Image (tube, rainbow, N blue to C red):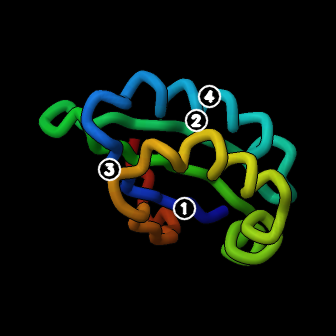
């Protein structure tokens, strides 16, 4: 499994609406082929900065299958209006899980 990590800056004052949008979009992720998990983390030092962490079976499941789906469009319609700038996305693989 790989993880997509999307760092998202939201417009000031829209944090609550953004969080609600991500919660509303969660079923679209859950229904996506290869999607295994979804969590949203908020920075303590920078409360307008979030990290969306999504577990996928493969990068292709994210970049091809999901991004070409109606679920991706729904996700962007629900959360995208609150983006201050385009998300910065990378994919990672766990190389150590010590405890």
Q: Which residue is mark 3?
A: 9
Contact, mark 1 vs mark 2 (Cβ under 8 Å): no
Which of the two discs, 1 and 3, labels the residue nearer the N terminus? 1
x and y percentages locating residue 90 in the rendered image: 46, 71
Instruction: Please tell me in which quadrant of the rendered image residue 86 appears.
Output: bottom left
Label 2 Cα crowd, 10 Å radius (few <14 / some 14-19 / many 20+): many
Q: Secondary structure at mark 4?
A: helix
Q: CA distance from mark 2 to mark 4?
A: 4 Å
Name the residue located 59 percent from the left edge and 51 percent from the top edge.
54
In the image, is 98 to the left or to the right of 28? left
In the picture, the quarter occupied by the N terminus is: bottom right
Instruction: Please tell me in which quadrant of the rendered image residue 65 appears.
Output: bottom right
Name the residue located 39 percent from the left edge and 36 percent from the top edge.
41
Which mark lies nearer to you, 1 or 3?
A: 3
Which of the two discs, 4 and 1, labels the residue nearer the N terminus? 1
Q: Which mark is residue 54?
A: none
Q: Which residue is mark 2?
A: 22
In the image, is 35 to the left or to the right of 83? right
x and y percentages locating residue 93 in the rendered image: 52, 68
Q: Residue furthest front?
A: 81
Contact, mark 3 vs mark 2 (Cβ under 8 Å): no
Observer-nearest residue: 28 or 78?
Answer: 78
Q: Which residue is mark 1?
A: 4
Q: Secondary structure at mark 3?
A: strand
x and y percentages locating residue 46 in the rendered image: 17, 39
Q: CA distance from mark 4 to mark 3?
A: 17 Å
């Amino acid at each position: 499994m790989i993880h997509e990590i999307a760092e998202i800056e939201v417009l000031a004052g829209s944090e609550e609406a953004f969080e609600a949008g991500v919660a509303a979009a969660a079923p679209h992720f859950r229904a996506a082929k290869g999607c295994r998990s979804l969590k949203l983390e908020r920075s303590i030092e920078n409360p307008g900065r979030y990290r969306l962490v999504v577990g996928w079976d493969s990068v292709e499941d994210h970049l091809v299958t999901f991004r070409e789906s109606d679920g991706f469009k729904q996700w962007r319609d629900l959360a995208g209006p609150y983006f201050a700038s385009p998300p910065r996305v990378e994919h990672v693989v766990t190389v150590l899980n010590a405890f």
